[in-house]
Image: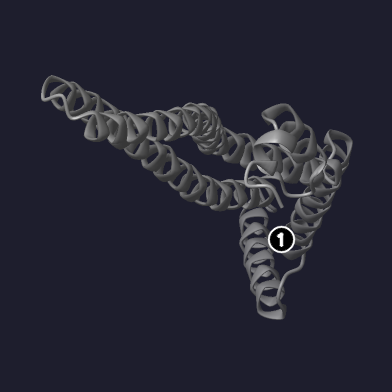
Amino acid sequence: MSIFKRLRDLTMSNINAIIDKAEDPVKMTDQYIRDMQEDLEDAEKAVAAQIAIEKRFKQQYEEQAALVKKREEQAHTAAKAQNVDLARRALEEKKSAEQKMNEFKAGYEQNKAAADNLRGKLDEMRRQLTEMKNKRETLVARYNAAKAQTEINKAMNGFSSDTATAGLKRMEEKMLQAEARAEASNEMSSKEKSLDEEFKELDKKSAVDDELAALLKQYENK
């Protein structure tokens, strides 16, 4: 798999579309964050390797450039001393160093461009990873709120206002029935008298009758 496959194929818009279809978007987001983190680590290693190549070409280019300058100065020194053979050898090595210098320069420029390109992609991967991490916090809050709302809706579906009203009405009817039974029981209790109470009332009535008879007897002969 390409080091930058995640960056190429999983843009933020594609990630959002996949997350929207996921059963658990939080778990899906966490998985993408882990994948992107791994890809970022691989990319950092690749960029570091490319930068090392770039620096090596630059070093070789600078070494050959220094050698070209040195051999040119030596050629002038030999020419001043009228040492033709030494001047020729210095110029020949200068020519060879110039050829290598140009090759290393081209390699350096090519690898520097590649390294710069990878640096840009690496920065983009870091930006997307940071964006995904920031989005996760909002996503978790929204997902939990949606789950809570779903649970509330499920509970409310089994608890309608009509059901509650009907239940309350049945409770009121049962309460009225209980109160009626209590009142009837109280009336029955007040009407029923014990045997002792009835004899007591009978004795009381007899005493009144005896007293009345005696009172009437006093006025019979008058």
Q: Is residue 28 left or right of residue 122?
A: right
Q: Give 34 or 121, whichever is nearer the viewer.
A: 121
Q: Vertically, is 217 above or below 204?
A: above
Count up the numbered dots: 1
Q: Quadrant of residue 213?
A: bottom right
Q: Quadrant of residue 79?
A: top left
Q: Give 115 or 156, whichever is nearer the viewer.
A: 115
- Counting from the top left corner in percent of width and height, residue 75 is at 22, 26
Residue farthest toward the left in the current orientation of the protein: 81
Q: Vertically, is 105 above or below 38?
A: above
Q: Which residue is mark 1?
A: 190
Q: Amino acid at mark 1?
A: Ser
- Counting from the top left corner in percent of width and height, residue 166 is at 88, 41
For mark 1, give the secondary structure.
helix
- Counting from the top left corner in percent of width and height, residue 104 is at 44, 34
Residue at 53% of width from left, 49% of height from top?
Answer: 37
Residue at 68% of width from left, 64% of height from top?
Answer: 205
Residue at 56% of width from left, 38% of height from top?
Answer: 136
